[in-house]
Amino acid sequence: MIKKFALLTLSGRLPAFAVVFSFLALALIFPLASVVSGAALVSVTLHAGLRNGAVVVAMSALALTMACYAFFGNPVIGLYAAIAQLTPSLILAAIFRSTRSLDITLQAAAVIGALVFIVLDIALPTNAAFWQQVLGQIFEPIFQAGTMSPADVESSIATLSEYMTGIMVLSIVLVHSSLIFLGYWLNCVAQDNQQYKEEFKNIRLGKVLALLALALTLAALALQSSTLAQLAGIMAILFCIPGMTFIHTLCASMTNSKLWLIISYLLVIFVPQVIVIIVLLGLFETFFGLRNKIN
């Protein structure tokens, strides 16, 4: 089933467009469908090159813009959704195709994310006020329910709004980096190739990026700077990937390895705070080679 889907996606521009656009449109109702459209785009770009990937993005953006105009009377929704969801995947897929290195691609994702955050922070100095307004609308039911005092809710919103831009950029970096793995996996499935397994196991993000993330974290703590804290998070978040490879290696050395691996992923999905522990594992793995010690 997966192989048929992968082969269909890679069989030409029109099938690729049909797959990417269909799941992109479905994502307007079911957001998780954007994962499939992004992975399909990555797969196409790796297989057929940046030009073909860009054509698929342009066709999908035009089609979604027209569809949103026809159904909602607002073409901007479709154009924004297509560009926001597809462009980061296209850029990272092009980097991966050029370098053939997951390590370099992930490092580039972290650096690009940090640069985007810096530009947004400089260009939009009222970001916090914007997020405070948005979060106020989201948390309005809490005001009405009276489960928290108005002062506590306002304090929480004010604090969270200071970090929301960084959280959004961090999330985009993590999601689109994950789509690189999914798209690469689809490519390998289409070719009956198991190479992705070895490359995933051997990911190394490098000590330079790890030291930069740690330095930014220490500076943020010392200076009580929300800007530096957000930058630190963006630079550090991708260390959850070597952290997960360590967990894969650890689980493989245990009895009932598949069960432990499933439990690990369920914890990540349902207890988001666990991601902090996994990032720390990834940083420790970078400096001390924990996987090699288990092997």
Image (tube, rainbow, N blue to C red):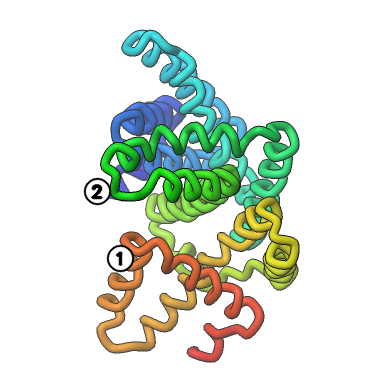
Frontmost residue, 124 versus 208: 124
Query: Callout 2, which amino acid?
Result: Met
**Position above or below: 104 against 155:** below
Locate residue 117 relative to residue 181 in the image: left or right: right
- Mark 2 and mark 1: span between their CA atoms? 24 Å
**Front of the two marks 2 and 1:** 1
Q: Looking at the image, can residue 78 be seen?
A: yes
**Disc 2 secondary structure class:** loop
Give the tally of numbered discs: 2
The residue lying at 33 percent from left, 74 percent from top is 261
Sequence-wise, the earlier of marks 2 and 1 is: 2
Q: Please rate how many residues cluster around mark 2, counting C-alpha atoms within 10 Å: few if below 14, some from 14 to 19, many from 20.
A: few
Q: Quadrant of residue 257?
A: bottom left
Query: Callout 1, which amino acid?
Result: Leu
Return the x and y of residue 88 as percentages of the image width and height: 57, 40
Q: Please rate how many residues cluster around mark 1, counting C-alpha atoms within 10 Å: few if below 14, some from 14 to 19, many from 20.
A: few
Return the x and y of residue 160 as percentages of the image width and height: 52, 48
Locate residue 124 relative to residue 152 in the image: left or right: right
Locate residue 116 relative to residue 294 in the image: left or right: right
Frontmost residue, 213 versus 176: 213
Q: Looking at the image, can residue 99 be seen?
A: no
**Disc 1 secondary structure class:** helix
Return the x and y of residue 10 as percentages of the image width and height: 43, 39
Locate residue 6 relative to residue 278 in the image: left or right: left
The residue lying at 37 percent from left, 42 percent from top is 36
- For residue 266, which numbered disc appears in the image? 1
Q: Quadrant of residue 232?
A: bottom right
Frontmost residue, 101 versus 75: 75
The residue lying at 55 percent from left, 87 percent from top is 292
**Position above or below: 110 against 144:** below
Name the residue beneath numbered marker 2: 1
